[in-house]
Image (tube, rainbow, N blue to C red):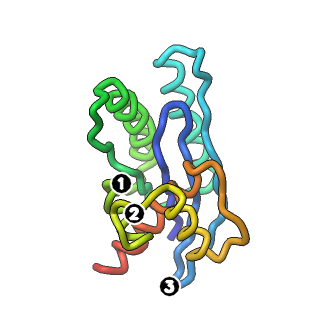
Amino acid sequence: MIILGVDPGLTIAGFCLLEANGKKINLHAYGTIKSDTKDSMPNRLKYLFEEVDKIIKKFKPDVLAIEDAFFSKNVKSAMVLGHARGSIILAAALNNMTIHEYAPRKVKLSVCGSGAASKEQVSFMVMKILRLEKQLKPYDISDSIAVGLCFINQERLR
């Protein structure tokens, strides 16, 4: 099974492609999607959609695992994140993918054992779980991997 893990964002969205085969997990690809902050909101959302669609068509993942929106005191930031998530989820839905959403605390709990883990702790645990030689930067990448690992962990519990 190939999982597209996404840490959504309009300025920077992290993504990864994980393959889960029994107890073995392989990291096939990872990166970030960066929109031009000078572009209009509709154009930035279109760009995000198109880039996610390209990734889906290239790697043909079975599942999208995406971090759910967190509750923020800044309503505008929460709205922008919701728009970005919508673009990503739409790309997956139009490609007939199964979509799983996980709260940030659940992702951190699944990977680190604590729902209050820092980005540094998440990055460190991702590195250890996948036996990577170095931590991946920016944290958007390790966060996307954590979301994918959360999906794998949740599926194993079923």
- Disc 2, disc 3: CB below 8 Å? no
| Measured Cα–Cα span from mark 1 to mark 3 | 25 Å
Q: Position of residue 3 (x, y in %)?
A: 50, 62
The numbered dot on residue 22 is: 3
Vertical arrangement, residue 64 with respect to residue 45, above or below? below
> Is 89 displayed left or right of 52 in the figure?
left
The numbered dot on residue 104 is: 1
> Is 4 displayed left or right of 26 in the figure?
left
| Measured Cα–Cα span from mark 2 to mark 3 | 22 Å
Callout 1 crowding tier (Cα within 10 Å): few <14, some 14–19, many ≥20: many
For badge 3, the amino acid type reads Gly
> Is 148 displayed left or right of 19 in the figure?
left
User: Which residue corresponds to the image point at 57% horizontal and 16% vertical from the top-left?
Assistant: 39
The numbered dot on residue 108 is: 2
Vertical arrangement, residue 7 with respect to residue 39, above or below? below
Q: Nearer the viewer, mark 1 or mark 3?
A: 1
Q: Could you tell me if residue 101 is visible in this image?
A: no
For badge 1, the amino acid type reads Pro
Element class at badge 3: loop
Q: Residue 112 or 107: which is nearer the viewer?
A: 112
Q: Residue 104 or 3: which is nearer the viewer?
A: 104
For badge 2, the amino acid type reads Lys
Sequence-wise first label, 1 or 3: 3
Sequence-wise first label, 2 or 3: 3
Figure quadrant of residue 100: bottom left
- Disc 2, disc 1: CB below 8 Å? yes
